[in-house]
Amino acid sequence: MLQRLNITGVRNLQPCHLSLSRLNLFYGLNGSGKSSLLEAVHLLASGRSFRSHQIRKVIQDGQQVCTVFAKLDNGQQLGISKDLQGVQLLKRNGVIVHSLAELAHDLPVQLLHPESIDIIDGGSKPRRQLVDWLLFHVEPVFYSAWLRYHRALVQRNALLKTLRVDETEWQVWEKELAESALILHKLRAASIDGWLFFVQNAILLLLPQLVLKVDYVAGFDVEKDFVTQLTESRLKDRERGHTQLGPHRADLRLKTDLGLVEAVLSRGQKKLLICALKLAQVDFLKANNKNCVVLLDDVASELDVLARLRLLTHLQQLDAQVLMTAVEADTVWPVLCELDNQAALFHVEQGEVTPRYF
């Protein structure tokens, strides 16, 4: 859990030094800096903004660098700074860290924001990323297997665009691709089964009338030899210019009795389903002795009074720290402080974050 959070040079935020509780609500008008605060925590945990791929847009106008520092309740201290050229400095307990993956393991952050709707309405990539976020945090071998697979995928895609390729080179990279693909598939299939137990529990709380069915699609025929499938698909893959089979084409199909969820659920129901999917991962991590920080941007939007109550109740029962935002405190705070009298309230105005005490 984040005990202390210091932020400088991030968008319009004034330098802030915050003491946080387990449940924290940041409220203010649009453009006040609420989402930028969540963005800063996400930057610390992943090295990336969830709002822009360009660090220049994250760093405050007139500044050369942005910095985020946090002290955790386990005594660890984590910090990141990035300059306009994208050069970054990572530290854990004052010692330079060379890998973002290390900080990400130290501070698992689960993000829910308006663009999370792509998990339902978008293509397969956001759903793969959803599964792979979980695997990164619970399966030690996943990240190396993922890197190995994508390295081989890049090599095979390069061969597809080369006119003359020695058969031995095809065999080397297709064998490497197939071996790493099988590892990824087995890790995904096993973790999805465990995760869905927690998903069903979350749905009972958030969408009690929903009967959800989740089908995992591997991206290739797992009953057949994958090397053979790759060999047989070379001609078609050459025509397309990329490899069409493999774990990089995996997907989750989310269905109800009435059809695919993107076609039958309302916007509010979709938001609650995404919350169920992601918060179930927080519970899964906890079952694997890992703590998580939840970032929930615009918690009240598209939810009626009952849906907000269900979500806030679930967040209160969740064994995790939550940082959430809302335009108006009245839509969230009365329920939140009744659920947890230790919850913290912050007002954000023109980049200045101020604690509110009641």
Image (tube, helix red, strand yellow):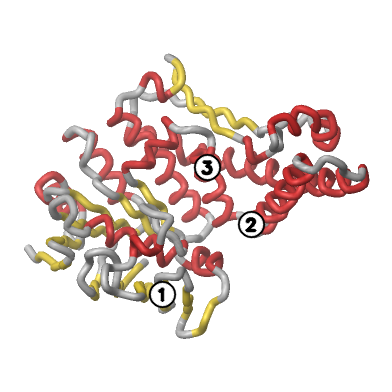
- Give me the disc on residue 308: none
Q: Are marks 1 and 2 in contact (CB under 8 Å)?
A: no
Counting from the top left corner in percent of width and height, residue 114 is at 32, 42
Taking 209 as reference, is 216 left or right?
A: right
Q: Nearer the viewer, mark 3 or mark 2?
A: 2
Q: Which residue occupies the extreme bottom position in the image?
A: 94
Res. 344 in view: yes
Comparing 243 with 69, the one in front is 243
The residue identified by callout 3 is 195
Q: Name the amino acid type tagged 1.
A: Ser
Res. 292 in view: no
**Real-space Cα separation, disc 1 to disc 2, in angstroms:** 24 Å
Q: Name the amino acid type tagged 3.
A: Trp
Q: What element carries label 2?
A: helix
**Real-space Cα separation, disc 1 to disc 3, in angstroms:** 34 Å
- The quadrant holding residue 210 is top left
Comparing 316 with 304, the one in front is 304
Earlier-in-chain disc, 1 versus 3? 1
The residue identified by callout 2 is 143
Q: What element carries label 3?
A: helix
Q: Nearer the viewer, mark 1 or mark 3?
A: 1
Counting from the top left corner in percent of width and height, residue 292 is at 42, 58
- Give me the disc on residue 81: 1
Q: Name the amino acid type tagged 2.
A: Tyr
